[in-house]
Image (cartoon, grey):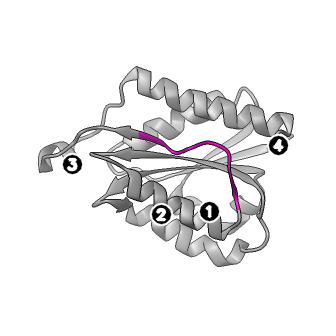
């Protein structure tokens, strides 16, 4: 059976909720592992057939903890996961495009195959209070996360990637 690894970082709950929604849907299609970025190791990447990366955008960039995951795992798996499918989700306060670009550049270095354009959920948090507050992701946006998880899980299970 195929295995999907969902790696996420979340400080205020938004990207965690997004990753949980995707994992919930993917579990109906394939074996799915949901791991926090700080707990994910190179062997977790090697043991998976596909990936979903989910992180917040902080200061127009990937969150530091997600970047640390990529920094820590990049070289130990380089050349060993080429061609595997991936998708990504970004929880952003305004735009999320730069965080998505950073993740895509790292995935390109690993020679992963993008199978879905980035899903960017915008919370419109623009004040210090809103940025630091616990995030609530509306149900219709969580549904988009579920659809992505379902599609990625089903594609892995059917071997279409």
Secondary element type, mark 1: helix
The answer to whether residue 30 is visible is: no
Question: Mark 3 highlights which residue?
Answer: 132
Quadrant of the image occupied by residue 115:
top right
Query: Which one is in front in this view, the residue at disc 4 or the one at disc 1?
Result: 1
Q: Which stretch appears magenta? A: 112-120
Report, in whole angstroms, how far the alpha carbon at label 4 lies from the one at label 1.
20 Å
Question: Mark 1 highlights which residue?
Answer: 107
Residue situated in front as seen by the camera: 122 or 28: 122
How far across and down, in percent of the image, does residue 69 sit? 53, 66
Decide if residue 126 is on the left or right side of residue 97.
left
Label of residue 148 in the image: none
The answer to whether residue 69 is visible is: yes
Q: Earlier in the sequence, mark 2 or mark 1?
A: 2
Q: Earlier in the sequence, mark 4 or mark 3?
A: 4
Q: Earlier in the sequence, mark 4 or mark 2?
A: 4
Query: Which one is in front in this view, the residue at disc 3 or the one at disc 2?
Result: 2
Q: Earlier in the sequence, mark 3 or mark 1?
A: 1
Mark 3 burial class by Cα count in 10 Å: few <14, some 14-19, many 20+: few
Question: Mark 2 highlights which residue?
Answer: 102
Report, in whole angstroms, how far the alpha carbon at label 3 lies from the one at label 1.
29 Å
How far across and down, in percent of the image, does residue 145 sit? 52, 32
Label of residue 2 in the image: 4
Query: Which one is in front in this view, the residue at disc 3 or the one at disc 1?
Result: 1
**Looking at the figure, which quarter contains the C terminus?**
top right
Secondary element type, mark 2: helix
């Amino acid at each position: 059976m195929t295995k999907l690894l969902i790696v996420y970082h979340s400080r205020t709950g938004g990207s965690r909720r997004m990753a949980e929604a995707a994992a919930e849907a993917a579990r109906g299609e394939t074996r799915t592992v949901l791991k926090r970025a700080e707990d994910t190791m190179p062997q977790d990447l090697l043991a998976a057939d596909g990936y979903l990366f989910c992180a917040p955008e902080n200061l127009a960039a990937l969150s530091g903890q997600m970047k640390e995951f990529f920094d820590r795992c990049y070289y130990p798996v380089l050349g060993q996961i080429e061609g595997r499918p991936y998708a990504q989700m970004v929880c952003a306060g305004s735009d999320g495009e730069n965080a998505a670009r950073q993740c895509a550049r790292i995935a390109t270095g690993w020679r992963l195959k993008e199978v879905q354009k980035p899903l960017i959920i915008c919370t419109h948090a623009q004040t210090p209070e809103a940025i630091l507050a616990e995030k609530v992701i509306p149900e219709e946006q969580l549904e988009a996360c579920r659809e992505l998880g379902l599609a990625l899980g089903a594609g892995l299970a059917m071997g279409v990637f």
